[in-house]
Amino acid sequence: MCVFCKIVNKEIPSKTLYEDDKVIAILDLSQATFGHTLVIPKKHYENLFDIDESTYLHLMKVVKELALKIKTKLNADGINIINNNHQAAGQTVMHYHVHIVPRYTNDDFKIINIDHSKDYNLDEVLNKILK
Ligand code: ZN
C-alpha cells in the first residue's frame, strides 16, 4: 500500500486540514513554504491520466476553496497550484495529489521557466498536438 493510502487509512498520522468522503487535505511534511498543503483523493489513482472525472472535479473544487482559505488565513501574497504527473515531471509519490503552495514576497521557492521561444516553432507544436 502506498504512503498516501496509509495516510488515508490513518495508518500514518497526518496534519489534516480538510476531509470528506472523497478527498483529504494534509500539510506537506516538507513545508516548501509556510502552509504547503497536499490535496489527495482517498481512492488510489496514480496520476491525472487515470483519476476519474467526477473525483477530479470535486478535488479541484476543494483545492480552490482551501487555496482561498490558506491565502486569507496565512496572509499569503500568492498561491501556486502544482500537480506533477510521472517521474519526468517530478512526481515522487505515485498517488495523485495536488500541491497548494502559498507564496510570500521574497520567499525561496523557485519555479524555473526558461524561454525556448527561439528553439521551437509554434506552428510545428500546434500541428503535432492537433494532428
Ligand atoms: Zn495510494
Image (cartoon, grey):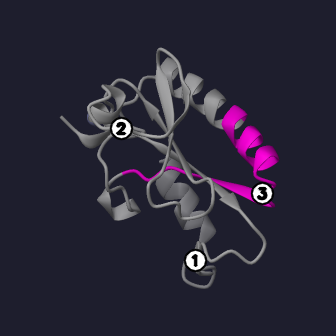
Residue 117 placement, left or right of 45: right
Comparing marks 3 and 1, which lies closer to the viewer? 3
Where does the N terminus fall, quadrant-wise?
Answer: top left
**In the rendered structure, which amino acid carries the disc numbered 3?**
Ala
Determine the residue positioned at 29% across, 32% down. Answer: 5
The percent position of residue 74, horizontal first and vertical second, equals 75, 52
Residue 6 placement, left or right of 82: left
Mark closer to the chain start, 3 or 2 = 2
Q: Dots 1 and 2: beta carbons under 8 Å?
A: no
User: Element type at marker 2?
Assistant: loop
Mark 3 Cα-neighbour bin, 10 Å: few <14, some 14–19, many ≥20: some
Determine the residue positioned at 40% across, 61% down. Answer: 89
Provide the residue designation for mark 2. 13
Mark 1 Cα-neighbour bin, 10 Å: few <14, some 14–19, many ≥20: few
Provide the residue designation for mark 3. 76
Where on the image, by quarter, is ligand 1?
top left
Vertical comparison of 84 with 58: above or below = below
Mark 2 Cα-neighbour bin, 10 Å: few <14, some 14–19, many ≥20: few
3D distance between C-alphas at marks 3 and 2 = 26 Å
Provide the residue designation for mark 1. 112
Q: Quadrant of residue 44?
A: top left
Q: Quadrant of residue 119?
A: bottom right
| Highlighted magenta segment, given as a residue range | 65-85
Residue 77 placement, left or right of 44: right
The percent position of residue 34, horizontal first and vertical second, equals 63, 60
3D distance between C-alphas at marks 3 and 1 = 20 Å
User: Element type at marker 1?
Assistant: loop
